[in-house]
């Protein structure tokens, strides 16, 4: 049985992530979803906690009729201060795997350096399906809810996530001045 990692920050989990996970399941039998930068939260680029992101992913996958949740595992993994050791930290925290799915060039490079196969999922409508774009829309009061699964939206609403994104952005903006 083949197993792979799917690595992302999921800030927030969106429909592009669902498409990438579906793509991954056309190539492997099991998928370990790695929540990268799990230590980061309440920052402009990382407003949601690892637990919130895990809930967004789990609830969204449970509601998806195509994805078999019994074949997924979700593991939060923190960054390390030494890039070259991060992939080894991943290895200590996840079951053995055969490949890595990522569209992050640097993450891919770190795994390729260790002769681990890296597969880039086809990006679906990347202009819109991007955490950066979704957070930008939240800040500017531009419609964004159609870009995330319904379960992710429910979690963001429950934690007042849009308000958090705005307050964090304003807080960091004022510190720079």
Image: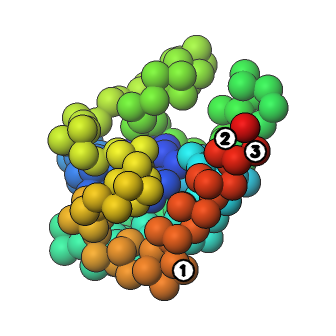
Q: Is residue 91 visible?
A: yes
Q: Is residue 155 visible?
A: no
User: What is the x, y in percent for residue 37?
Assistant: 65, 47
Q: Residue at x 69, y 55 (%)?
A: 171
Residue 80 vertical placement versus 105 (above, below)? below
Pick the residue in front: 41 or 22.
41
Residue furthest to the bottom in view is 158
Pick the residue in front: 7 or 170.
170
Pick the residue in front: 133 or 60.
133
Q: Quadrant of residue 84?
A: top right
Q: Provide the residue designation for mark 3.
A: 175
Residue furthest to the top in view is 113
Q: Quadrant of residue 76?
A: bottom right
Dot 3 or dot 1, earlier in sequence: 1
User: What is the x, y in percent for residue 117?
Assistant: 43, 25
Q: Residues within 10 Å of mark 3 (few under 14, many from 20)?
A: few
Q: Is residue 87 left or right of residue 61?
A: right
C-alpha gap between disc 1 and disc 2? 32 Å
Disc number placed over residue 159 in the picture, else none: 1
Say which of marks 3 and 1 sits in front. Answer: 3
Q: Provide the residue designation for mark 2.
A: 91
């Amino acid at each position: 049985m083949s197993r792979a990692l799917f690595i992302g920050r999921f800030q927030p989990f969106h429909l592009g992530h669902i498409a990438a996970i579906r793509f991954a399941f056309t190539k492997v039998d099991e998928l370990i979803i790695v929540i990268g930068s799990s230590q980061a939260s309440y920052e402009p680029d990382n407003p949601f906690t690892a637990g919130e992101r895990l809930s967004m992913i789990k609830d969204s996958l449970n509601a998806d009729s195509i994805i078999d949740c019994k074949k997924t595992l979700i593991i939060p993994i923190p960054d390390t201060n030494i890039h070259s050791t991060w992939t080894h930290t991943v290895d200590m925290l996840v079951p053995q795997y055969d490949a890595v799915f990522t569209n992050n060039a640097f993450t891919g490079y770190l795994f390729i350096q260790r002769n681990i196969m890296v597969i880039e999922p086809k990006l679906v409508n990347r202009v819109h399906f991007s955490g950066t774009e979704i957070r930008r829309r939240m800040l500017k009061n531009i419609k964004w809810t159609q870009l995330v699964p319904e379960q992710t939206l429910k979690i963001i609403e429950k934690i007042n996530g849009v308000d958090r994104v705005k307050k964090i952005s304003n807080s960091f903006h004022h510190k720079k001045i």
